[in-house]
Image: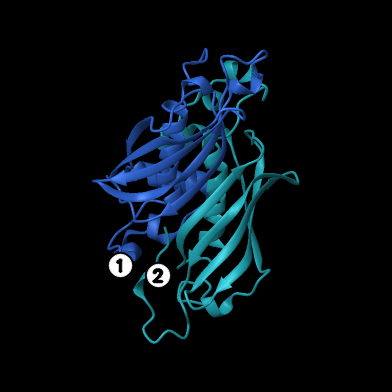
Chain colours: A blue, B cyan
Amino acid sequence: MNTLGGLEIEDFSVGMKATFSKTITEADIVLFSGVSGDNNAVHINHEFAQATPFSGRIAHGMLTASVISAAIANKLPGPGAIYLNQSLNFRAPVRPGDTVHATVTVKEVLAEKRRVLLETTCMVRGQTVIDGEALVKVGSAHAAARPAASAVSH
Amino acid sequence: MNTLGGLEIEDFSVGMKATFSKTITEADIVLFSGVSGDNNAVHINHEFAQATPFSGRIAHGMLTASVISAAIANKLPGPGAIYLNQSLNFRAPVRPGDTVHATVTVKEVLAEKRRVLLETTCMVRGQTVIDGEALVKVGSAHAAARPAASAVSH
C-alpha cells in the first residue's frame, strides 16, 4: 500500500474486486450536460424523451461511466493509480434515480510494467448497463526509486 | 438527415469529421467530482496536487472524454445516434482553463448494420490528450420502417 492508501503492484492478485455505488440523480444529469457540453434532448427535454422508446429522459452514457472512474480512484487501486485506458460498451439506458454499482475486478497483473488490467462493469438492479476494461499503472513497494508519478491519478 | 437534424447512414463517407470544443473550467472539475463521486486529491486538493509531478490539479480523464460525447451528440452524427461503445487512451493531463478540442472522424461505414466507426481525439494546444474510437448506430433514410430507436442517443 502506498502512502496515500492506494494499492501497489505487489498487493494485487487476479480476482480481487471492489465496488463503488452512486445514485444518478436529476441534478447529476443537468450538471453533466453542463460540464460535458452534451445537451442532447434525450437527456434534458422530458417532452422529447417521452416520445422516444425510452419513454423518458436517460443519463448520458459517459456520466454512468464516470462512476467507474470513482471506483478506480476511491477503491481499487485507490489513490496513486494512473488511468491509462478504458473501454466502454453501453448496454442499456440508466434513468434518473437509478443507483449504479461500478465493480472493478483484477483480470491480469503485469508485474514488470506495474500495470493492472481491470474488468469494469456498471450494473443497475442486477442488469449490466456498461461493461469494458481499464488499464491502470501503479507504484511498487520494492522500486529502488519509486517514481513520483505513482502519486497521481487522472 | 433525420428529423432531428442528425445524420443517417446514407449521409456518411470515410474521412468526414467534426469538432466540438469546450474549455474545462475550475467549476467543471468541482462539479464532475460531485456527479462522478471521484474526489481524488489530484483533482480537488491544490496543496496535494502541487507536490505531484503535475505541479497542480488536473481534470478527471473522464471529464475530458465527456467532450467526445458532446461532439457525437451535437455534431457527428448529431441527434438520433445511439452510442454503442467507446475506447479511451489517456495520453496527457488536462489542466483547469485548458480548451479541449474533441474531433470525431469517420473511419468506417458499416452500411448494412447502420453503424459508423469513428476515430475520436481530444487535443489541447495541438497535443493529443485522449485518443480512441467510438462505434455509433444511426438511422436510415431508406429503411421501410425506420426504427424508433433512431431518435435517441445515450
> Taking the image as drawn, is residue B105 in sight?
yes
Residue nearest the viewer, comparing B105 with A82: A82
The residue depicted at 48 percent of the width and 56 percent of the height is B85
Residue at screen point 37% across, 76% down? B147
* Left or right of A114 on screen, residue A100: left
Q: Position of residue B139 (x, y in %)?
A: 45, 75
Q: In the rendered view, would you say B28 is above or below A126?
A: above
Q: Residue at x 48, y 74 (%)?
A: B114
| Residue drawn at point x = 39 percent, y = 87 percent | B144
- Residue B45, quarter of picture: top right
> Judging from the image, what secondary structure is the residue with disc 2 in?
helix
Residue A5 vs B23, above or below: the answer is: above
Q: Quadrant of the C terminus of chain B?
A: bottom left
Graded by Cα atoms within 10 Å as few (under 14), some (14 to 19) or many (20 or more), the crowding at tag 1 reads few
Question: Where residue B83 sits in the image (x, y, percent)?
Answer: 46, 60
Going by the numbered disc 1, the residue's amino acid type is Pro
In contact (CB < 8 Å): disc 2 and disc 1: yes
Residue A53 image label: 1
Marked residue chain, label 2: B
Q: Mark 2 Cα within 10 Å, few/some/many (few <14, many 20+)? A: many
Residue B151 badge:
2
